[in-house]
Image (cartoon, rainbow, N blue to C red):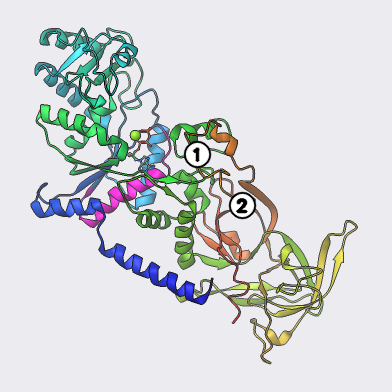
Amino acid sequence: MSKESENFKNHCSENNSVESEKRLNFIEQIIEDDLQTEKFDGRVHTRFPPEPNGYLHIGHAKSICLNSGLATRYNGKFNVRFDDTNPTKEDTEYVESIIEDVQWLTGRTFDHIYYASDYFEQFYEYAVDLIKKGKAYVCDLTPEEIRETRGTPTVPGEESPYRNRGVEENLDLFARMRAGEFPDGQKTLRAKIDMASPNFNLRDPIMYRIVHAEHHRTGNQWRIYPMYDWAHGLEDSLERITHSICTLEFEHHRPLYDWFIDQLGVYHPQQIEFARLALNYTVMSKRKLLQLVKENYVNGWDDPRMPTICGLRRRGYTPEAIREFCRRIGVAKFNSMIDFVQLENALRDDLNKRAQRRMAVLRPLKVVIDNYPADQTEWLDAVNNPENEADGTRQVPFSNVIYIEQDDFMEDAPKKYYRLAPGKEVRLRYAYYVVCTNFVKDAAGNITEVHCNYDPATRGGSSPDGRKVQGTIHWVSAEHAVDAEVRLYDRLFTKETPDDPQDPADFKTYLNPQSLEVLNGCKLEPTLKDAAASEPFQFERIGYFALDSRDSSAERIVFNRAVSLRDSWTKQQEK
Ligand code: ATP
Ligand code: MG
């Protein structure tokens, strides 16, 4: 990039960030207006309402960061509430993972977790109230028959033959549904609204269905379970949520939530819809993610290639980076596709500031420094983080046999190759200048060893005679190196929109066969032996890495690459 265009870009992005600090998004605007008019007595109370039927992914992160962020910004409250109305698809495994992920991402701890299932009795009473008001009825049509009689956008639906049952009969039948007298699917409770409404959601929607299934919290207490649309708005009402923020597809459900609330005459939260996050080169449907796990295309929900929060965490993503990503993409009223690079850049920007630098050689090539004493070790100062002086320095051991990256040596180097080659001099980071004198090949023609001489006057990496070298490479002392396995990840899919509805091919045909590369026998500088699982590092010139929380042990060190570096510092770092 030319200097001018770089300046231009910096100028624009600075302006942008200043602008976005000042400008409110449309949801903040609504909240500030409500605060002005004291609509909710000056309260702000948001929530994140997951269904415990899968692990959270980066799309959920957008909703969590938005809701939690608004509560923080306006000194309000933030609930985590499980929308656990569907016993056959739910599991405590999901409940636990979701709580862990929300705590990790927001940095909050929760005194109380809310559950829709805690309100089942209250929902039942509300339903009885609607029956008594003549606003709900027990219907004997099967779910298929209900679907078939719903009509089309231009043709009104047919009224159910059971629509005009008397209140007493409805109350009796509903109580017997609860008592478990009828098999699954034989009856439903429906709201009595308007079979001719242009909004399908208002054509006598089902409120309760019969399901003889054990619930992960209420056990076998219930034989009827509330439908999502019946329960959802009431959950928000019961918790006195002020702003019920949800994704755009619920816009047409809002009139139904409003209808229930108005008929019952209970507290009325304000629903606001925003566009869900779509990210390229991945899928976010829970059903598809489950398929990848169940059919072993990935190694579990927390596989570092998964867009799940636990996968991103295991890969080395930080909560700060994900929150910053969510801040940068903002909220809008229209759906759009976000580039995966934006997520990676948020991580790079965060880790560039915070990650300590280390030297690690992923594909080692042995280098013997012939004029360096074979029995000597020197401990050299290395800067932990040039972006943060407070991080100080550490010492790295130097000896006569070291490893460098295989691609930092070339037998026949082109003119612009600034790394090691016969007769060429380079700087070993934090150590000395070395010049290549010779190399050894095996029978197959592979280079197995490189020989160099070092210049003792260049200790620390600069020459007193002002002699410049163009390349700086990283290295690890062979005798002191820690062996490790390093896993390099790439995008999970080769296609930007693997689950494009227009594409008849199965999304799995676009799985990237090169999404995981495992390197064994990597050589790390000795301090990395004591790395903690969540501690991010920059392996100089390579990328950002973190210890694998699942597979690493004292005997087996495994690092994951969170993200590569944009550029290597080979040229820019020349001082
Ligand atoms: P399901 O099809 O099972 O309902 P879901 O992705 O909607 O899947 P929920 O557990 O209902 O999962 O989601 C919890 C919350 O996260 C909801 O409020 C939903 O609007 C929000 N959410 C889900 N996916 C995204 C996304 N891609 N972007 C933003 N918010 C999302
Ligand atoms: Mg949902």
Camera-side residue of 560 and 62: 62
Identify the mark nearer the N-term, 2 or 1: 1
Magenta-colored span: 54-77
Q: Position of residue 475 (x, y in %)?
A: 68, 69
Query: Is 362 positioned to the left or the right of 233 in the image?
Result: right
Mark 2: secondary structure: strand
Q: Position of residue 100 (x, y in %)?
A: 39, 44
Q: Which residue is at a point 53% across and 46% down the rendered structure image?
A: 304
Looking at the image, how many numbered discs can be counted on the residues? Answer: 2
Instruction: Name the image quarter holding the C terminus.
Output: bottom right
Distance Cα–Cα, label 2 vs label 1: 18 Å
Instruction: Name the image quarter holding the N terminus.
Output: bottom right
Question: Crowding at label 1, few (<14), some or many (≥20) Cα neighbours within 10 Å?
Answer: many
- Report the disc number at residue 488: 2
Q: In the rendered image, which residue does mark 1 sit on?
A: 301
> Is 43 above or below relative to 188?
below
